[in-house]
Image (cartoon, coloured by chain):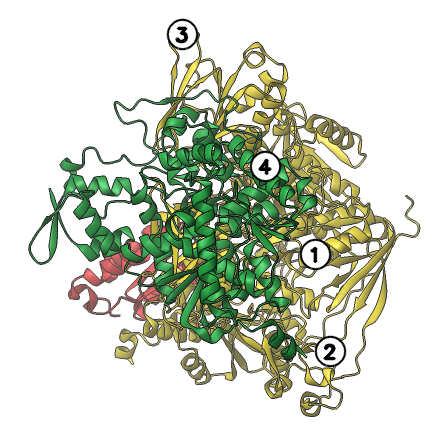
Chain colours: A green, B red, C yellow
Amino acid sequence: MIYEAKVNELAEEFGVHRNTIRNWINSGVLPAQEGPGRRYLIQWEDYRRLCDKYGREPRFMPDPEARADAPAAPHSPAAPGQIPVRLDVRASALDASPGQINICLTCGSCAGACPISGVDGFDPRKIVRMAFLGLEDELTASGWQWKCTLCGKCEAVCPMKVEIVQLLRRIRARCDRDKVPAAIRKGVATCLEKGNNLGIPKDDFLALVRELGEELARTSCPGFVAPIDVRGARLLLTVNSKQPFAEPEAMTWWWKILHAAGESWTISSEYWEGINWGLHVGDYGAMRTIVKRIIDNIERLNCTALLLPECGHAYYATRYALERWFPEALQQFRIYTVFDLLLEYLNEGKIRLDPAVQTKLTTFHDSCYYGRHSVEAFGHGYFEEARALTRACCKRYVDLVPDREENYCCGSGSSAWADPYRVERVYHGRIKARQISASNARLVVTACLNCRDQIRYSLNSEFNLNVEVQFLWELVANALVMTPPAAMEARRD
Amino acid sequence: MNRNPIIIAFCCNWCAYAAADLAGIARLQYPGSIRIIRVMCSGMVHPEMVLRALNQGADGVIIGGCQLGDCHYIKGNEMALARSEIIADTLDDLGFAPEQFQLVWVSAAEPERLVRAFREMSEQLRAAPDGAEAETGP
Amino acid sequence: MTDQGMIGAVAVVGGGISGMQAALDLADSGFFVYLVEKTGAIGGAMPQYNKVFPTNDCAMCIISPKLVECGRHPNIRIMTLTTVVDINGRAGAFTVRVLEHPRYVDPAKCIACGQCSSHCPQSVDDSFNILMAERKAIYIKYPQAVPLKYQIDPQACLRLNQPGACGICAEICPPGAVDFADRGQEHNLRVGAVVMALGFQPFDPGKTRAWGYGLYPNVVTSLQFERFLSPGGPTGGALVRPSDHRPVQRMAFLQCVGSRDKNRCNNEYCSTVCCMSAVKEAMTVKEASPEVEVTIFYIDMRTPGKEFERYFEQARTEYGIRFVRSRVHGIEPKGQKGDLRLRYINAFGKQVEETVDLVVLSVGLETPDATVRLAEKIGIHMTPDRFASISAFAPVHTSLKGIFTCGAFNGPRDIPQAVIGGSAAAASVAALLHPVRHTLTRTLPPPPERDVSGQEPRIGVFVCHCGTNTAGVVDVDAVAAYAATLPQVAHVARNLFTCAQDTQDLMAQQIRENGLNRIVVASCTPRTHEPLFRKTLKSAGINEYLIEMANIRNQNAWVHSQEPAAATAKAKDLVRMAVAKVSRQTARKPLRIPIAPSVLVIGGGVAGMTSALNLAEQGYRIHLIEKTNQLGGNALHLYQTWSGENVPRFLKGLKEAVQQHPQIEVSYSSTVATVGGHVGDFTSLIRTGPNRKRTIDHGAVIIATGAKRYIPEEFEYGKIPKVVAAIEFDKLHMHNEARVANGKSFVFIQCVGSRNQQRPYCSKSCCTHSIQSAIKLKKEAPDRRIYILHREISTYGQRERIYNQAREMGIVFINYEQHGPPQIRKSDNNGGVLVEVWDHVLHRPLEIRADMVILATATLANPEAAALASMFKLPLNRDGFFQEAHAKLRPVEFHVDGVFVAGLAHYPKPLEESITQALAAAAKAGRLLARKEIAQEPTIALIDRQRCDDCALCVDVCPYQAIRLTEYKDQDGVVRKAVTVEHVACTGCGICQGTCPKRGIDVAGFTTAQIEVQIDAALAAAPMAEGAA
């Protein structure tokens, strides 16, 4: 049977943009022929496969004979030929704290909340159930753990507080290493071996930093010198290797702010990597090693504060590791979030911001790690701080709905961006894209590199969002009023 | 008959009248031309009352009592049943149609049954040939 | 303790339905009651509800008579705006320190004219309508409030916040009732016992943003939605969206908001009432607007109460309400127009997004913080779920002797359970304080009765709107106008709710002022409301029987709701008939009958023994008859209550107490053979053993005949020895029989014989029971694998805790549906059993190798109930259980006076509910016996000497042998025979009247002449009559 459909009908049906449907057709994900009246002709089977992939009920069914293999009614006794799962519940290898998974009510809250429930059979409730019923091998082999962004929406809505994110992390950790997506597996290996995820040689890095510093001194910050290995500096700054590699000037927004604030800060020449994919691949040994290097740098350079500016997860992983394995280190120095530091500057008058610079309707996207995960792990989410800072830099602000604890993930968190899960990542992002277009914002501000890239590159093109995406510190750097210190002093009097 | 037949329904306090109340609670609908008269027991209804109703212009009379064997007063409904034969004979002699007088036994928890009896009687009377209607005069 | 120093008064704290019931039962049992209510009027939560499940009665209509009764009772002192500060003393003699907050309106002066409110310039959110409407700073809580006295909200009042400001109300008030200088007062109430009926508050879903409550206007709570549906609510009963007042087309109910949740709130318990409440609200919507699409999202539909399962089925199959087993995680707006988006996982595991106009959050019940603080101060123990801690064996006793408790303060519960609890608390108080019964009560003689005999009828007609129940269909204005044209009608009035207390007072006033001597109330049914109006007639000084009701609601507006014109015409006819009948009404006097101070209790199970013991403690004589040769009933098979209390030990104590009590006489191997007489004076023939018989005289009867268990035919029961019924398993388990002791894998199957087509009811206690057994098995050997295959898990209330505990321990719960029951077969090897079941989450079949399969079998009605029912003329419901007089407000009574029901004979229930109900039945019997004599309805046959020719046809037909031929000597000394009626024996059936050829005998109130004029009046507008005219 042939299904005749318009692109916009399919887009509506699957909750994605017309572009995404066209991409599916062009890439062969959805085999289709052009038909009359701007319609596409799709084989019923192909349509069914697509529905299965995205966990959707087919909108209509062909005649009964053709649907012999259609799913049986729920709760029917086994269909002929279906082999029952033999149950032998024992202590699950995935159940770290007894009772944690067992207590699931099977109410379905998690599965309803999850933006990718149903995709390739992914379903957080099912995952919890499989773990509980001792099907962990099947679970580990499923690949679901890599499609999940660990955004924690499921856990936040669970009435029984089942730690679903922890469970997914354990499944990731249990996975054979050769089943871990190559990009992050290699990133961790490279980081352990060469000091950063991309293996950028020390000389190249130092040359780049020097060059960027000189450029900054020329353009906006007279007298600026990029501080490498400055002993006794207050603040140690880490770097996301993706930036020197792909977008070096992005580093300078922070530099500009730190310069304007008169901060005493430094970057380490070695082990400057801040991001920590040990968290994502479930390799706690690697995670610990990478964090230990940062501690060593702080001790070596005698700093008293740490800022991991690049990514939500970098802050989370580092702080989590510090609290778990190096609690004494936290007595030695303070770990800042980007929000804490920027607000400190703003409140203490170290920087001044001009909201008139940014006239676009602006919104802020909460990253999962600074938001929900921070609430869960550290008891505080950076919701209001983010909004105070954003509002200080723009004239018109609007919130996404829902946001804060209820926010939706960009669709690419926790390394879900890693190949081969592009299709799932874009599909996951449909909700974010919908939220953004519903807000009418023209500028999306975020504090996480992952979120920023997903919205800026993938969602913008897939969903025709046509929005600008900026880092929070980019927004702040652009709004900085660069007053000479003397003039500022005078004004304060 | 092109209007809803007018029916006088004598309903015993314990079952039929209670069922009629319950029909309201359950929002069961029946024709608006039925008039219920509450009596303590179906056995209280004197044959003369049935005749009087028909003579005064009712199209039908129904007596509603408890299920046989469940009379609140032991055997009142059985009395009503026994009397009904005499009533039917008399009505026949006077030229009334048999469907113009009926009995219905319902429990207090069976509003559907009562409403069905109301509706069916109403339909039967409505379907009756106009001749039968013409005969219902004094 | 000695009787000395005991005080015959009781403080009931909390004026909700439970507290009101306790107060009424106590006041009628001979105790003076202080009914302490913290708001400005009694009624609690119930007046806010539109309808009640599963009867769909209008809540206001059924609570109104109780409100009025409390308001009028000479031995109840209602103290509103009053809170308890502290309680000191001991059982028998407490001092309750209360603070009466200022009302700023003198209730003695206020005439509730409402002028103050209409002139008050200050509007605030109305808490009665839950922020959906406004009220003034001077206001009444709700239009039918008791007491109907205005009060000033000190937060909102301009004058109270700024001296010298405003004060308009004080200037305008005709009787000068406003008093800005009113100050709070403390009182010390001296009482012998306290009943804590402190009630609940609805969960506030605004605590988390996820539900969108407070963010999106079209998200409302279930309680707000009640106000929406209510004719007296902010939209006048119209179902429109709050955002734009557009009619609702698609709506959803989300269950378990603020219940069964330890993440977004700390309410782990189930709130018990929300499932049924949502079904009711959905049905109400569908009745008014069948085109509205209604979906209820739920985890388990918990319908364990009587007739609940049928109601749920009816909602699903007849009303087309969609039920989706999926908890919706939150609500998001869609677009700018107020639409709401829901995303959920369906039964196939697919995610679905839907858009609705309106979301109703079925919010849970919780104990307010202030209540918890008060309990702590007084020293009442509380549960971890913040409810009063009670024992299943003493379900209305707090941890403090002499302080009792009922209602939602004991845990979330529905109205019948609250009413039963109120009565049970009253019974427990009565047992404690019976030596000082009648020491502090007073009786008010009714006002002298005007003799209206010989007067021309002056008829008053009162037409009731019943909110929109009647007025929504019938043109009540036209009916009232028509009534005024009828002969002998001297006065016509219309009322929104005729049964409200203020209307009753107004009616009495109008009767007096207009010299009315006959009354017609055109409203609902005389079966429920005539007693109320009779009291009003009495208070107005005319005979209480000079009333007739025209049933224009139940038998008109509701059954002709699609034909307003026909309904209005019929309403006029009904009024005309009532006017005709009442004009021939005569004054009657009730017959006073002494009450035998003893009670026959049928059934020696826990319910029967509890009733017997309580009544014996109240000082009455009890005949307890038990069919078998031992006491204990079904509880003999129980080992523990849901909270883990030891049943055999309790049972032993109870049996001993019953056997040793001097006031209780137990007859074993005994049944009731025949019953005669009536309330206050029954005579029963008791058969003991094969050939011993004797008669017992008693004033009341309590039926506690228990229930039977279902013997399954399904699941290979009886074919595979390892498949056993729960009751058998318990025995094996207790004796640690080898199959249990060595068993490693156990499968429980729920709903065996329950909730199917044949028996569409939930047996209520089996889920809890299986979970308890499972926990015990798991505790004995943690490596045991235990599976519970269930349809809904009905661990309602705080029982949810053991469900959570069971899951935490690793017990596996698998949901099956009726169309796909588990399959059972023998295992090929090692003699085990293989159970195959479809998993509701994995969507795959599972196979379990079980060492034992335990069937949770249904509880069936006792087949012997039918015989008893026919002896006492009691109805049974479709499942064979006794049908109480009213499912909500008369849960242990029948329409037959003096007969009460308790325990499993009424419906399957767990032990503590049986005990509570048994106490409630005892309260009702005690309340009756405390009156010492009762007034029997004078609806009896009277002989018309003018017409009677003593033919004696009536003598033969009278089923009660109440009519006799009596010999007398006439003037000439000739012995003659005359027909006479023995009034006490006459039941007023009127079979004589239907038989008499001479119209010589009539039942008062239903005379032949009255029936005739009703017929004539009914047909006055008929075409034939017109033709004849």
Question: Which kind of residue does numbered mark 4 sit on?
Answer: Lys
Residue C369: give its label: 1
Determine if marks 3 and 4 fall on one subunit: no
- State which chain disc 4 sits on: A
Determine if marks 2 and 3 fall on one subunit: yes
C-alpha separation, residue under disc 4 versus residue under disc 2: 76 Å
Residue A292: give its label: 4
C-alpha separation, residue under disc 2 versus residue under disc 3: 82 Å
Q: Which residue is mark 3?
A: C829
Q: Which residue is mark 2?
A: C107
Local crowd size for mark 3, using a 10 Å CA cut-off: few (<14), some (14–19), many (≥20):
few
Local crowd size for mark 4, using a 10 Å CA cut-off: few (<14), some (14–19), many (≥20):
some
Q: Position of residue C200 (x, y in %)?
A: 64, 56
Verify CB contact (< 8 Å) between mark 3 and mark 4. no
Local crowd size for mark 1, using a 10 Å CA cut-off: few (<14), some (14–19), many (≥20):
few
Along the polypeptide, which appears first: circle 2 or circle 1? Answer: 2
Secondary structure under tag 1 reads helix
Residue C214: give its label: none
Question: Which kind of residue does numbered mark 2 sit on?
Answer: Pro
Q: Position of residue A331 (x, y in %)?
A: 70, 44
